[in-house]
């Protein structure tokens, strides 16, 4: 195992990479008007670039994980970050909308595989019994991005043109490459790992159930969060200037929930996922019932990010536990499932708003998704108990 100092620097390298990825994922939302003007399309049309990024994550996570399964993990991380830099440079240089859509798709492709491989490297470097805390540390990049990277890049894009935000992200990617090369230890590739073995190990019931928990249950948070801006103005009755405060609260919630998730994981991954699913459903109901008052509204929005952090880390670890020979593919696919949840939650939330049920309706939909996710978790727990139940003793 690497020396403690080396482990710390390697972890910082992984967090910086996550920070860059989190920044590019969410900064587009804050710069949509500027991007729309820049490529001469409407704001709703420009919003499709967000979907293009998510599609890149969903496609790229399993594809790149399988293709890179036989690579040494350090080399794979560097290669993924190079692809990330290329995608963001392409975004910054995009001369038209079609180019921009392609560049955002390419930018999203390394996302899931990077976090999946980073989690595996973190576990490789961790002391015995501290895998949960190790994975939670490398996942801090996204909440740090929500607190600092996204606001900073948004401000830069507003002041110096939207392309400047993506140049900044590309520079962060180059910095990540340097840190990865310098500080992440070389971990020999698994000589027995092949594409065929990865695919075979991936096709198990528990892997499928765990991905379904994320894709369905996690969609509850996205159903609510996708429409937080109009909820704050139309339901809570605050000025639009209050929306960034809610977003800051969400980012802080991620910073709080992610390290808590690591400690809970080292206690029990399955119990932690149960806490996340049940807690998220109850929290969404509480938000829907109290959104008209700003103090409980911001508290329950903050709490949703705390619970989200618990779910992300523990779903990641659960996939690594049940994947067998498909470690790289399963670890990367967690983020494909979460981006599926993003699309599902946002779509269903939009459906109930369009039907005239108001801006608290997505939270009720989200609570329903959390219940469905908990139901899938129940199936997973039932199978887990059956698989681990001692065989009955044979009688003579």
Image: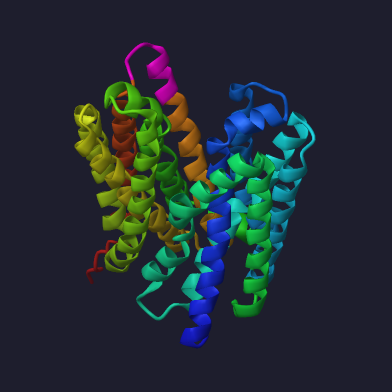
Q: How many marks?
A: 0
Q: Kindly indicate the quadrant of the structure image that contains residue 271.
A: bottom left
The answer to which of 69 and 176 lies nearer the viewer is: 176
Range of residues picked out in magenta: 349-358
Residue furthest to the front in view is 159
Is 49 situated above or below 332?
above
The answer to which of 360 and 278 lies nearer the viewer is: 360
Q: Kindly indicate the quadrant of the structure image that contains residue 37.
A: top right
Residue furthest to the right in view is 95
Q: Kindly indicate the quadrant of the structure image that contains residue 364.
A: top left
Measuring 59% from the left and 32% from the top, which residue is drawn there?
A: 32
Residue furthest to the top in view is 356
The answer to which of 151 and 283 lies nearer the viewer is: 151
> In screen coordinates, is 195 left or right of 123?
right
Measuring 27% from the left and 27% from the top, which residue is drawn there?
A: 236
Is 95 situated above or below 59?
above
Q: Position of residue 231 (x, y in %)?
A: 34, 26
Report whether residue 118 is seen. Answer: no
Q: Position of residue 372 (x, y in %)?
A: 33, 35
Question: Which colour style is shown?
Answer: rainbow
Measuring 46% from the left and 60% from the top, which residue is drawn there?
A: 139
Measuring 54% from the left and 59% from the top, which residue is drawn there?
A: 18
Tell whether position 337 is magenta: no
Q: Position of residue 232 (x, y in %)?
A: 33, 29
Report whether residue 32 is seen. Answer: yes
Which image quadrant: the C terminus? Answer: bottom left
Looking at the magenta stretch, what is its main secondary structure? helix
């Amino acid at each position: 195992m690497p020396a403690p100092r080396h482990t710390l620097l390697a972890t910082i390298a992984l967090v910086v990479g996550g920070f860059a990825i989190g920044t590019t994922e969410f900064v587009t939302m804050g710069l949509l008007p500027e991007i729309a003007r820049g490529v001469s399309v409407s704001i709703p049309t420009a919003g499709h670039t967000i979907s293009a990024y998510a599609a890149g994550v969903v496609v790229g996570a399993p594809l790149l994980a399988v293709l890179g399964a036989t690579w040494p993990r350090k080399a794979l991380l560097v290669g993924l970050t190079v692809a990330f830099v290329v995608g963001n440079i392409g975004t910054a240089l995009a001369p038209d909308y079609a180019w921009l859509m392609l560049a955002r798709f390419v930018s999203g492709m390394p996302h899931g595989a990077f976090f999946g491989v980073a989690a595996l490297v973190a576990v490789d470097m961790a002391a015995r019994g501290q895998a949960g805390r190790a994975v939670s540390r490398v996942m801090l990049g996204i909440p740090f991005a929500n607190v600092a990277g996204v606001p900073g890049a948004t401000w830069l894009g507003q002041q110096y043109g939207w392309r400047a935000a993506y140049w900044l992200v590309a520079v962060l990617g180059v910095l990540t490459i340097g840190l990865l090369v310098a500080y992440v230890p070389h971990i020999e590739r698994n000589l027995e790992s092949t594409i065929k073995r990865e695919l075979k190990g991936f096709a198990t019931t528990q892997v499928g159930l765990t991905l379904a928990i994320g894709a369905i249950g996690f969609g509850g948070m996205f159903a609510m969060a996708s429409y937080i801006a109009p909820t704050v103005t139309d339901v809570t009755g605050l000025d639009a200037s209050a929306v960034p405060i809610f977003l800051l609260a969400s980012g802080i919630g991620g910073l709080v929930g992610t390290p808590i998730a690591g400690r809970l994981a080292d206690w029990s991954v399955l119990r932690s996922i149960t806490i996340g699913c049940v807690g998220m459903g109850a929290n969404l109901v509480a938000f829907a019932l109290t959104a008209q008052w700003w103090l409980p509204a911001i508290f329950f929005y903050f709490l949703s990010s705390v619970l989200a952090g618990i779910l992300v880390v523990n779903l990641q670890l659960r996939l690594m536990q049940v994947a067998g020979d498909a470690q790289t593919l399963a670890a990367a696919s967690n983020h494909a499932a979460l981006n599926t949840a993003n699309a599902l939650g946002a779509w269903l939330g939009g459906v109930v708003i369009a039907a005239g049920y108001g801006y608290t309706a997505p939270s009720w939909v989200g609570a329903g998704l959390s219940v469905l996710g908990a139901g899938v978790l129940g199936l997973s727990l039932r199978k887990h108990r059956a698989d681990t139940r001692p065989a009955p003793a044979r009688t003579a």
